Amino acid sequence: MWQFHQRLRPFTAISFDLDDTLYDNKPVMIAAERHVADFIAQQCPETAELDVHGWRALRDKIALQNSELASNMTALRLATLEHGLTQYSVKNPKQYAEAAMAEFLLARNKVDIAPEVHELLAALAERYPLVAVSNGNADIHRIGLGKYFQAAYQPGNGLRGKPFDDLFVAASNGLKLSSPSELLHIGDHPVSDVQGALRFGAQALWYVPNKPIVEATWLPHARIGKLAALYDLL
């Protein structure tokens, strides 16, 4: 079911957030973070008292101190790992942080995508060019979605994450759009997805499968509770 807040204008391309939009990312993160905490404890026993909860608390603390870092999950996690290892006087902290990050990326790309999501993306890709615009580090090819997307835009190489408009600008340029409003962005987060898309000038569709923790302070063009509603765009 659609709930409209603004008139949805014609668009020529669609961008999707990945985590918690096309799949439930929470169990993926829980498993990946636990794996990395165990890996570090084995490789660097001096950090053993810093369990998965301690690593999360450290990550959240660093994110609060740096908004740009907070929008780039790869850089944030790497900075957290290096900071924690340095804090416990681990020799070669950067080397171990990079090794732990590699382990994290292996685990975080073990994502189960529902068959109906594959079917929906396949149908949409026949009608519109699709791109992924995500602050996370899921690899669209490793999680099995690469065949639907023309490209994936994620923080790094000088690009800041959402709600900064860097990724939207890159996506718009890659799609060769003549106006930001030609892009319809779909995502679950009221700030990074809704506010970020609207600030750029794109149209925003807020995916809200459950009651939101916070309401969007910038009204999206529309909201949906189920991805199947997107068949109405065909």
Image (spheres, grey):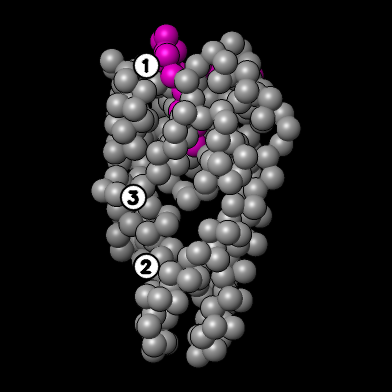
For the record, the magenta segment spans 1-17
Determine whether the residue tagged by mark 3 lies in a helix, strand or loop.
loop
Residue at 33% x, 57% y: name it.
69
In depth, the one of 214 and 111 nearer the eye is: 111
Give the quadrant of residue 36: bottom right
Q: Is residue 30 above or below residue 58?
A: above
Residue 148 position, x and y percent, is 56, 28
Residue at 32% x, 18% y: name it.
177
Under mark 2, the amino acid is Ala
Under mark 1, the amino acid is Glu
Mark 2 or mark 3: which comes first in sequence?
2
Residue placed under numbered mark 3 in the picture = 156
The quadrant the N terminus occupies is top right
Q: Furthest residue to the left? A: 158
Residue 161 falls inside the magenta stretch? no
User: Which mark identifies residue 182?
Assistant: 1
